[in-house]
Image (spheres, rainbow, N blue to C red):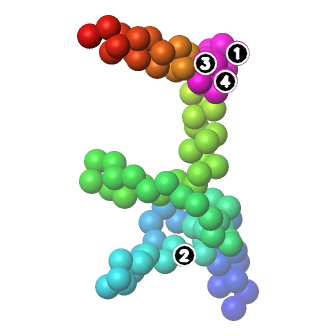
Amino acid sequence: MAARRKRAHDATTNPPASLRGHVSEAGRLSLPVELRRAVGLERGGPVRIELVDGAIRIRTMKEVKDRIRALARESGLTDKASVADFLGWRETERSSEAKAAGKR
């Protein structure tokens, strides 16, 4: 019995790369607890679902945000751009578009 508990604990901290699941007729998929714990979704939360090369990929929103931040850091844009900068640029662009439309 102790060996079984140890295996369950190991599966929780290091889940297998592949687990069997089931999709209900209503389309609901239940994620095994080992996977939810591994990615910090024990109590649920928002996820991003993508179709990638015919496979369904599920990522936590935290993972998505972390990846976006990493890409911004790698590109060198973190010090040069902000939401306020983008909104200011977009407002200027919108005004230019409105003026150009008025001249037609």
Which residue does the numbered mark 4 point to in the structure image?
Answer: 84
Amino acid bearing label 3: Gly
Which residue does the numbered mark 2 point to in the structure image?
Answer: 32
Q: Are marks 1 and 4 in contact (CB under 8 Å)?
A: no
Q: Earlier in the sequence, mark 3 or mark 2?
A: 2
Locate the C terminus by quadrant.
top left
In 3D space, how far apart are the residues under numbered discs 3 and 2 (Cα atoms)? 46 Å
Q: Earlier in the sequence, mark 2 or mark 4?
A: 2
Q: Residue at x 54, y 75 (%)?
A: 32
Q: Of 41 and 89, which appears nearest the observer?
A: 89
Q: Of 76 and 32, which appears nearest the observer?
A: 76
Residue 76 part of the magenta-drawn span: yes
Q: Of 100 and 90, which appears nearest the observer?
A: 100
In 3D space, how far apart are the residues under numbered discs 4 and 3 (Cα atoms)? 6 Å
Which residue does the numbered mark 1 point to in the structure image?
Answer: 79
| Magenta residues (range) | 75-88
Circle nearer the viewer, 1 or 4: 4
